[in-house]
Structure formats: C-alpha cells, structure tokens
Image (spheres, rainbow, N blue to C red):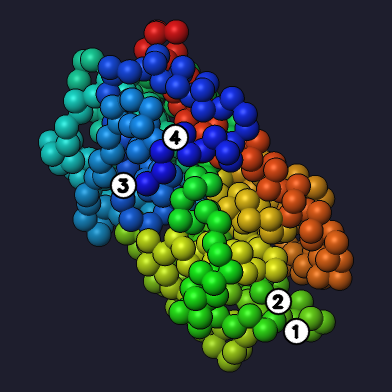
Amino acid sequence: MSHIDDYREVVPKGTIDFLKRLAEQVKGRKILHINSTKLGGGVAEMLRSHIPLLKDLGVDAQWQAISGTEEFFNVTKSFHNALQGQDQHLPQQMLQEYLEINKENARQLSFDAYYIVIHDPQPAALIESRPTQGKWIWRCHIDISRPQWKVWSFLKQFVVNYDAAVFSLPRFAQRLPIPQFLIFPAIDPLSDKNRDLSPQEQAQILSRLNVPTDKPILLQVSRFDRFKDPLGVIQTYRLVKKHHDLQLILAGGEATDDPEGKTVLSEVREAARDDPDIHILLLPPDANLEINALQRAATIVLQKSLREGFGLTVAEAMWKGKPVIGGSAGGITVQLVYGVTGFTVNSVEGAAFRIHHLLDNPEVMTKIGGDGKEYVRQNFLITRKLGDWLALMSYLGRRI
C-alpha cells in the first residue's frame, strides 16, 4: 500500500504539502463512504485507493457496502439505465423492493460518522434513516441530465434531503434545492493498475493471459455493458481489419451489482465467434496488474461508450502514454482534448477513421500519448481528487 509521501515524485510540486494542510481542517471528524459493492466497477476501485490515503493523512475514514437481493440489483440496474435516458418499466413492487432493502441496510449499518458520503442511486434512500448530527453528501457518478422522469422523480425525493450533491461534470446534474459541487474522478498512479511494469513483468502477464504480441493491439477495457458498446467496437475493428492486420482485445469483468453483464458478454462472444484475432478476456475484479499490462501492450486504446459516467479507463491508458479514441460521452470529452490528448467519435465509422489515421502516422501516436500523460498528471490523479474532497468537507463542516 502506497503512502501519501510516495506521490511526491509523481504529482505536481507542492501537492502533498497542500493536502496535509487541508487534512488538518477535517481531522477529528469521521468520514464514512457507502456504496453498493466492494468488488467490480469504478466506484469500488476509487474507494479502495481513496480511503487508505485519507487515513495516511490522519483522517478517520471508513468504507461500507450495502447488501441486497438479486431483485434489488435488477431494480437499481434499471435505475442506472433510466437515469441515463433509457426507457425502463418499473412497477410499484420493484420500487417497494428498493425501499425495503435500503431500510434493511439502514438497520445493519452504523452511521457513526460526521460526514456520510452515499454513492449513486443504490443506497440513496438511506438518507431516510440519517441521525440528527453530521453532513450527508450524495455522490452521483452517472449522467442524469436527461433521465426518465418517473425514475428521477422517485429518486429526487431522497436526494433533496442531503446536505450537498457531487457530480463528475456540470452537465450531469439536475436542478436541486441543495448545494452542488463538481469533483472529477481520478486514478491512482502508484496502484497495481497504473504503476510502472518492467518488460519482464509485462511479458509474463501477457503470456499468462495467452495474448499474442505479433500484431498491433486495439484494446477496450470495460465491463460488458451495452452503454460501453462492445459490439460497436467489434464492428470498428472489422472495418479497420480490411486495411491493417491487427487484433482486438475486449477485456472486462463483472460487477456484483450489474445483472445484465452475462447477457451482454454472451452477445459479444457470439459476435466474435469465428475470428481468431478477437480475444475476449473475462477478468476477476482484482485483475489490476493484468489490465496494466494490457494497456501498456496496446497500440491504440478504445473507450467507445455511448453513455458514460466519467470513464477512467481513458485516463489509465493516457497515463501509460497511449493514444485513446473514445465515444463522445460523459467525462471522456473532458479527458480527450480533441486532436491533442486523443479523439472523440460518434460512430463506428468515425472510430475506424481515427484508428486508420493513427496507424498510418506513428509520430502522431507518440505525440498524443506524451501530451495525454502530462494532461492526466495535471488533472486526473488521486491527489487532486483528495484535495477537492477535503476542501468540500472543510467547507461543509464550517471549519475553514
């Protein structure tokens, strides 16, 4: 586990000393983060790095995850899709299941903290059981700018009772009668997923995964989710394959709160069935070194999302100096400055065109990769995110 001072050689100068001063403002007040799973998904991954570094700064920080039935996670997956604009049918009994599971978790969890941070819709109704003391913050990681209104109206009745809401982008938010704040997600540059790998270590990992390195690699790392458009990635690869001999790797895992993943994975396997240059890797939640090695081996990284929260796989690849082509969705558009740190696209054909361009111009790939890494250093490392959270909590606690 890395310590906060280990980051001095990686992050911009003065960052660590600034964090230590900010931490003094919230010491003595416990922070509790609550989400829906400790395995799989970007939220769990961020908290796994975030909590230990807060503790290393002298802040009492804890993390708990709610539990739920299969039906509950079917409901919350429908919430997730509906809040991002997909039409969903949620009968009253499904909404009742959501409320009952939240009440059951409220009886089991301890809210013995001054700052309670609730992540995403799954545990949002826990606010109904808040104690009289402390500040409650709803952290929304998804784009709710154009939701299905019935679902948003249901969820909003809980959100308005929080002391603040935090979003990843201004345009993700809704009008609310509570203060709203912007905090970009971030990556941990010293974690197993992002730390430097020796050539020998990388080669061993790729060999274990049975990944050949004799052809250029197109890579997408993400859950098998329709919003990540894995079928569109395969179509893109097939257009490029007509002109360049390359291979495609689709690498991802399953999150315990995403019941649709198996269906999408089955569709992807069917689409790739007869092509030996398409490699589908189903990775466990702790496959951080494997993802690191794959991103470092990639020639070009894709994140062709149709809807996206923030899409930190983009920053991960940029940190490794890779050119990235992403869907024009969510936080991808903040990370990829068009033509400078990468390219955003709106179609299969657009993605294929940009891949052709990069493969035909290796000097452009090198320049974009270098600029992208520096952009991540300045904007999307975990130390910057820690500073944002400490400043927010200091403000809410009236301790500045």
Tell me, yes or no, if residue 235 can be seen here.
no
Picture quarter containing residue 131?
A: top left
Callout 2 touching callout 1 (CB < 8 Å): yes
The residue that appears at 59% across and 25% down in the rendered structure is: 14
Counting the numbered discs, the total is 4
**Amino acid type of the residue tagged 1 in the rendering:** Asp
Query: In the rendering, at what x and y percent does residue 189 appear?
Result: 53, 47
Q: Is residue 59 left or right of residue 228?
A: left
CA distance for labels 4 and 1? 44 Å
**Point 43% across, 73% down: residue:** 282
Between 304 and 291, which is closer to the camera in this rendering?
Answer: 291
Query: Which residue type carries mark 3?
Result: Ser
Report helix, strand or loop for mark 2: loop
Q: CA distance from mark 2 to mark 1?
A: 8 Å
Nearer the observer, 33 or 24: 24
Residue labelled with disc 2: 216
Image marks 3 and 2: residues in contact by CB distance under 8 Å: no
In this view, the mark in front (3 or 2): 2
Q: Which residue is mark 4?
A: 4
Q: CA distance from mark 3 to mark 2?
A: 38 Å
> Residue 274 location, x and y as percent?
58, 91
User: Can you tell which of label 1 and label 3 is closer to the viewer?
Assistant: 1
Q: Amino acid at mark 4?
A: Ile
Q: 6 above or below 325? A: above
Residue highlighted by disc 1: 245
Q: Position of residue 339 (x, y in %)?
A: 82, 50
Q: Quadrant of residue 362?
A: bottom right
**Residue found farthest to the left:** 107
Decide if residue 202 is on the left or right side of residue 74.
right
Q: Nearer the viewer, mark 2 or mark 1?
A: 2
